[in-house]
Amino acid sequence: MKYSHRLSDAVHILVYLEILGSNSSSAIADSVNSNPSLIRRLIARMVKAGILDRSGQRGEINIRLTRPAGKVNLLQIYQAVEDHQQFIDVDQEVNRLEPLGRSMPAVLSGEYDRVQTAAEQEMAKISLESIVDQVKGKIED
């Protein structure tokens, strides 16, 4: 299974902007250990979602949060950058001629929906500000 790092990278970008304030996609990419084009794509998604505001001309671009970090949560960031919103997928390629195979997708879908709801509720409780504060604490250690 391939895991997406978009959420981690997007949070890294936002924390970077909050702590260091740089608008250089190259500098941010260096910190994320990624490439500037990925950083620009993630920033564009967060601009589209209303998390970031981008202004200025080429070479003089200013990127900043549209609201205080305490008003941005992990769920909002996740929804802005991830294409696939489900955490767990149900295998639909089962033998539908067999009773157990026919029953599993429906049963698991209900259970996985509960997991999804619980995870989203927890993510909504985690503010960007709390992550920024934790990172600042680690930097100072």
Image: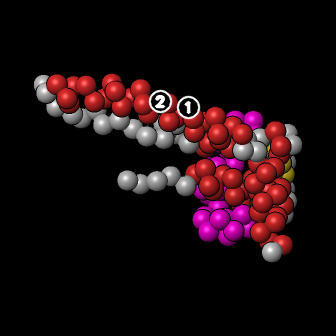
Q: Residue furthest left?
A: 97
Q: Residue at x 50, y 36 (%)?
A: 115
At label 1, the amino acid type is Thr
Residue 106 versus residue 18 in the image, above or below: above
Count residues near mark 1 (Cα–Cα under 10 Å), then give few for <14, some for 14-19, many for 20+: few
Q: Residue 39 in the image: state x and y as whole percent.
A: 65, 56
Residue 60 versus residue 119 in the image, above or below: below
Would residue 134 be found to the left or right of residue 82 on screen? Answer: right
Q: Is residue 40 visible?
A: no
Q: Residue at x 67, y 70 (%)?
A: 30
Count residues near mark 2 (Cα–Cα under 10 Å), then give few for <14, some for 14-19, many for 20+: some
For the residue pair 26 and 18, the one nearer the viewer reads as 18
Q: Are marks 2 and 1 in contact (CB under 8 Å)?
A: yes
Would residue 120 be found to the left or right of residue 134 on screen? Answer: left
Question: Would you name the residue on which mark 2 appears?
Answer: 113
Q: Which mark is residue 117?
A: 1
Secondary element type, mark 1: helix
Q: Residue at x 69, y 37 (%)?
A: 124
At label 2, the amino acid type is Asp
Secondary element type, mark 2: helix
**Does residue 86 show up magenta in the picture?**
no
The C terminus, quarter of image? bottom right
Q: Which residues are magenta?
A: 27-51
